[in-house]
Image (cartoon, grey):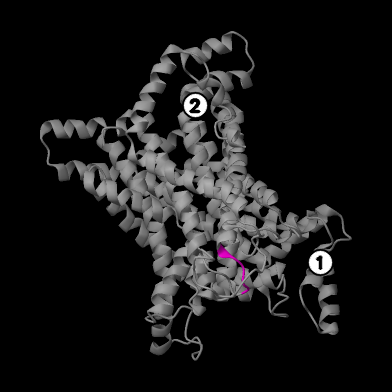
Amino acid sequence: MSNLAGAPGSDGTTDPEPIGERKKSEALYFAKRNPKLLIGAGVVLLFFLIGMIGPLFVDHGPNVYIGPQMQPPSAEYWLGTTTFGQDIWAQFVYGVRSTFLIGFLGGGIAFLIGTAIGFVAGYKGGVVDEILNMLTNVVLVLPALVVLIVAVAYLDVRGLFVQALFIGLTSWPWAARAVRSQALSLATRDYVDLARLSGRRTGKIILTEVAPNMSSYLVMSFILLFGGAVLIAAGLDFIGLGPSDGVSLGLMLQNAFQWSALHLGMWWWFIPPGFGITAIVSSMYILNVGLDEIFNPKLREL
Amino acid sequence: MWRYMGRKLGIYAITFVIAVTINWMIPRFMPGDPVRSMLNRASVSDPEALERMTNYYNEVFGLETPLHQQYFSFWSGLFRGELGISSMQYPEPVLDIILRAVPYTLGLLLPAIILSWILGNHFGAFAARSKGLDNSLLPFSYILTATPYMWLALLMAWAVGVVGGFLPTSGGYSLALMPAFSWEFILSALTHWVLPFLSLFIVALGGWAIGMRNMIIYELEADYSNYLQALGAPRRLIRRYAFRNAMLPQITGLAVQLGTVIAGALLTEIVFNYPGLGSLILRALNNNDYFVLQGTFLFVIIGVLIANFIIDIIYVLVDPRTRVQMTGGAS
């Protein structure tokens, strides 16, 4: 799943080029000294572990009615219980897991579509570029969440994967735009011309010549798409269009709101899920800034 | 410049056609009979009303006629302003329901967008390249942009409204009042407006600050900045030039971010039960009122397109280069 992250770029980093190696160790040198990257990656990793390992330590399902109702956080129920007596910690742990899942899937699908369109448009140019650019602009103007609301509302059974697919299909345009502008400048380089002269297929040239030279850029786009997908999914869940079975942080927020946790003063019901989303997405963004500072020497001396 | 505008208008026209087509396609191509499932799920108890509604929907969808004919009749209905009849507030036309909600959404959105844009830009410009501020304000801005709109809304409603009890947290005006043009009503509407506005404003602020900060850093690297610095120009002057240049991408950013902010407004409205389009969408979803849902969709799209066009015009007016460049035809 995680290899989606650098799918087109991953071929390039394994190339044993001496220049690439020196650059890599240089990047590592700066990475170790970049607090933004370290803190961001640390928090993301922490939540990732919570989502992956946490459910193993919860011996009951997230939606099971287990104990006393409306309990504030205590030693037994770490984050308290809902009005119905569900363990909020269990819901949180499973919710974090599905948050990562939706981020990887939704962001991954958007990333694949966006980079594919961006590369082809930027590399090919001409009429292909015109058409793809128009398509990108059209989808860019449509507000993703509103389109999603209308589309998802007609589905009887909603699963995580369908949600991810729909999110991926609507949130790719800006990535396509960003990749296109980068590919556009790379497509005119000499070595790309040389590859073209050697008669290789377009797809191969894009994958082996163009993509590796902007791999850091691609990774950063994926991270932004990941964050965007998580936020859109949370919004959809909150409106009540989340997965019909299962848990997510957005659904927890929706339940808390729907059963007026606000007016009952049950802060332990609505604070953790929102905090989880904010922490995951913001640390991803901060990690992204860190990456930017590492790969972009102009920003480094800050 | 006219060519540029024409191009843009063309893209918007295509977008509109595609949006309408999506709107038309979704109920027809999703699995299942739309009329049946709509009425099954819409809890209508009165058999006579159910009968009338079934007939009405069958007529509206016209499922017996060939597809292209359905499509064209959908368009002609649209131009006559017929968005169908609501099933949750039968027999009120969808258009009326939506038009009643639009002012609330606009009243929330426009000030939030404009003020957060202006303030965020100034914050960002201020923070750029000043070490302490940059390291404290920047992560904070990232946390703000990563905050789900509804969560901040919930937090504010809880902290200010429920615990503090300063401001009302539900509705667009006091339920004891009827919408009227009186001081009492305006005051009530204002107090109900503050919290949703603030939570929308705060989340939007972070993104602009980040964008501006990055642009300023980029501009300060540019040759003209270095040249000015070498000439010994005061820091303030260089920054002012950088700010003006950095404004342009931020205007484009406004168009790109519009969808996110609108989504945020819808979610915020739901939390505060604010009588705008967001609450309308939620109500329509809960009652399976697809006509209201699709009408709202169209309205939002039209609003976005108009806003995009206004932003394009502003961009051309502000940036002298586009005026020259765009006559050449490059976009």
Return the residue found at the far left.
B232
Relative image position of residue A109 (x, y in whole percent): 62, 40
Indicate the position of residue A99 as horizontal and vertical percent values. 57, 51
Magenta-colored segment: predominant secondary structure: loop
Badge 2: chain ID: A
From the image, tell me which residue sits under label 2: A184
Q: In the picture provided, is A212 more to the left or to the right than B13? A: left
Residue ID at (59%, 73%): A258
Q: Is residue A29 visible?
A: yes
Q: Secondary structure at mark 2?
A: helix
* Label 2 packing within 10 angstroms: few (<14), some (14-19), many (20+): some
The quadrant in which the N terminus of chain B is found is top left
Horizontal relation, residue A289 to residue A118: left or right: left
The number of discs equals 2
Asked whether residue A85 is drawn in magenta, I would say yes
Tell if the residue under mark 2 belongs to the same chain as the one under mark 1: no
Q: Locate residue B63 relative to residue A263 in the image: left or right.
A: right
Label 1: element kind: helix
One can see residue A143 in this view: no
Q: Left or right: A67 with respect to A275? A: right
The residue positioned 48% from the left and 19% from the top of the image is A188
Magenta stretch in the rendered image: A84-88
Q: Residue at x 38, y 62 (%)?
A: B202
Identify the amino acid type marked 1: Ser
Residue wearing tag 1: B37
Residue lying furthest right in this view? B64
